[in-house]
Amino acid sequence: MKARIGVMRDSAFQFYYPENFEELRRYGVEIIEVSAISEGQLPAIDALYIGGGFPETHAIALAGNVRFRDSLRRAIDEGLPVYAECGGLMYLGEGLLLEGRTYPMAGIFPLVFSLEKRPQAHGYSIAEVVGENPFYPVGTVLKGHEFHYSKPLEANGEADGLRYVFEMKRGLGIQGKADGLCRNNVLATYTHVHAFGAREWAGGLIRAAVGFRQKRAARYP
């Protein structure tokens, strides 16, 4: 049976490499489009991929969809694998600070992101996986790119219960050359990866999805 991988795809999250979808489909994945703006709850999926975009321009709508955010948190607490990049990372934080007002987001990581007038990172990136996570073996080297105007406020690492599993060899990451926030089966990063430049990405996402599907089937036969 095919793995069902959700893709957060709406006007807030629309930066994806088409080749990433092609690579998932090549392995038989069924891709389910998900909207954090218009849907009331997360559909039945085996993993979730949240790409980049501009959540800051949709902060009111994202913050207002409380039912969806609650369903996402419940799914993550139950072990749903989630892979998030850039805008997806921002959405998984506590909130977005815009013009003096904080808009609540999913609350998976204890970070509030602010938007700056100038890019906070822009260019190619290289990240080495240095910690255990649901998608990549330790020692994997990922080539990608960073481009964002946001930055986390007061990211104090372990003091905030944050666990980073990427070490940036090129690029800035989330803070102090650290990237790849990990909690349970969630991995969130500022680095965008292309399936052909990070061959481990598709396989890791699919393995995590299949593993979650099997555990759920065993729990609820």
Image (cartoon, helix red, strand yellow):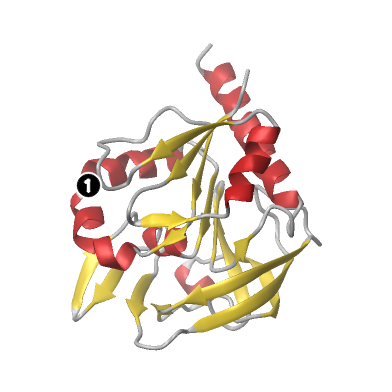
Q: Quadrant of residue 127?
A: bottom right
Q: Describe residue 206's horizontal placement relative to residue 10 as left or right.
A: right
Of residue 2 and residue 159, the one placed in the foreground of this image is 2
* Image coordinates for residue 152, horizontal then vertical, percent: 42, 77
Disc 1 residue crowd, few under 14, some 14–19, many 20+, Cα 10 Å: some
* Image coordinates for residue 18, horizontal then vertical, percent: 58, 49
Q: Quadrant of residue 4?
A: top right
Q: Amino acid at mark 1?
A: Val
Under tag 1, what secondary structure?
Answer: helix
Q: Is residue 71 above or below residue 138?
A: above
The N terminus sits in image quarter: top right
The residue positioned farthest toward the right in the image shown: 139
Q: Is residue 14 above or below residue 176?
A: above
Q: Is residue 13 above or below residue 33?
A: below
Q: Which residue is mark 1?
A: 66
Seen at 47% across and 84% down, the residue is 120
Seen at 43% across and 63% down, the residue is 87
Seen at 56% across and 46% down, the residue is 185
Seen at 41% across and 62% down, the residue is 53
Q: Describe residue 100's horizontal placement relative to residue 200 as left or right.
A: left
Q: Is residue 188 above or below residue 46?
A: below
* Image coordinates for residue 154, horizontal then vertical, percent: 41, 81
* Image coordinates for residue 101, horizontal then vertical, percent: 18, 75
The residue positioned farthest toward the bottom in the image shown: 118
- Counting labels gives 1
